[in-house]
Image: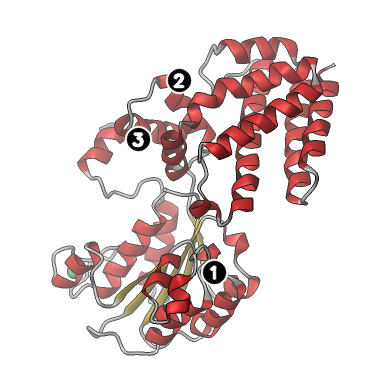
Amino acid sequence: MSNLLAAAAEPNAIRYQDAAIERIDKALRGGRLPHAYIFAGPDGVGKRRVALRLAQRLLCADPPADGGVRGCGTCDECVAVVSETHVDLHLIHRTLAKLHPDPDVRKRQALELGVDVVRHFVTEPATHQPARGRAKIFIIDEAERMNWQAQNALLKTLEEPPGASYLMLITTTAERLLPTTRSRAQTIPFARLPDEFVAEQLAARTELSDAEIGWLAGFAQGSLGSAMRFAEAGLHARRTAVLDLVFTVLDDALAFSRDIQALIKKTVDDGVITVEAAGSDSAVNRATQRLVLAMLGAALRDVLRVSAGGAPKAYAAGDAGIERLAGRLSPAAAGEAVRAVARSETVLEQNANVGLAFDSLGIEIQSAAN
Ligand SMILES: [Zn+2]
């Protein structure tokens, strides 16, 4: 059966995460399940679904004797977990601020997961016995959005989780968690999904062309969540505009600087990255700069691949723009251009002057090419 048919037959199947699931399974079988886990990995690869499976296993009235990270699937507990209504299953998200008893907390924008939410919805309830006797599960989504006060408030619970409490922190960027948080939980890395699987999923869920799907799957780097977001935002329609930037820079570095800033502004205006997703208006600009630079980097890496005699990864095989650029850039020049893009990402992280940063990126790519 193809992956696609398998996925259709079992829509909640968690695929390509055998290593992560096996580690949890081993801990369960050995009776050494840690009370705090960090599930780290790209968006949309199954972290939350694995957390819910583990919750089901821990809350199930009659877990299967042959083990595994799953409940029986049919008892009242399992059914309540699947419908996310179990009283001992606490799903924590920054937007819970809107349900906080304090009106001041409710009024906040809730872009961060704040200390008030952590205290009211995690550390305080964790001190109580489970309502139905078995365990108390806290699944914290977007854990990297906990500010340091929130993480500090959580430390004691992470260190000495009351009796039957289990915490699962879900994050795309574990490195944004404080070292003190990370040291008190066991981190399970979740793998990137294969490009072909992401492409199959996109094909099943969208009406896009093969070339568009191929680009999205290659650009999303193993994250189905990112690929779907990029598809919804229409990012694939900009893959040619990014190649145009490379053609421009070969002739005119400053025109490139102007054009890439215009493309970034247009991408901001189109709302490809929302304030809700980024955290603040200035973060939207920064995240969009990173996104467009990542698109430029992906294009240049494909030019490098083709120039070195290989096949492109994001762009379609035989893409006219990539072929022409590969004819103009030697592998060494394309490699240097890729490194220049990576350097400019670092420069922009350091709050550099944006115009100057793109001017010098243009000059660096141009001089690499000549
Ligand atoms: Zn069950």
Which three-letter amino acid code belongs to the residue tagged 3?
Gln
Tell me if the residue at label 1 has its CB under 8 Å from ligand 1. Answer: no
Q: Residue at x 52, y 69 (%)?
A: 186
Q: Residue at x 80, y 47 (%)?
A: 352
Which element is circle 3 on? helix
Please provide percent x and percent y for residue 314.
Answer: 54, 26
Residue 211 - label: 2
- Residue picked out by circle 1: 146
Q: CA distance from mark 3 to mark 1?
A: 31 Å
Label 2: how many Cα within 10 Å (few below 14, some 14–19, many 20+)? some
Mark 2 is on which residue type?
Answer: Ala
Residue at mark 2 to residue at mark 1: CA–CA distance: 38 Å
Which residue is found at the position 63% from the left and 70% from the top?
Answer: 178
Pair 3/1: label in front = 1
Q: Amino acid at mark 1?
A: Met
- The x and y percentages for residue 185 are 53, 73
Residue 341: percent from left, percent from top: 73, 34
* CA distance separating discs 3 and 2: 15 Å
Q: Residues within 10 Å of mark 1 (few under 14, many from 20)?
A: many
- The color scheme shown is secondary structure
Label 3, on which residue?
Answer: 201
- Whichever of labels 2 and 1 marks the residue nearer the N terminus, that label is 1
Is residue 41 among the parts visible in the rendering?
A: no
Front in this rendered view, residue 274 or 147: 274
Residue 243 appears at what percent x and percent y?
Answer: 63, 20
Q: Does residue 148 sit above or below 310 in this rendering? A: below
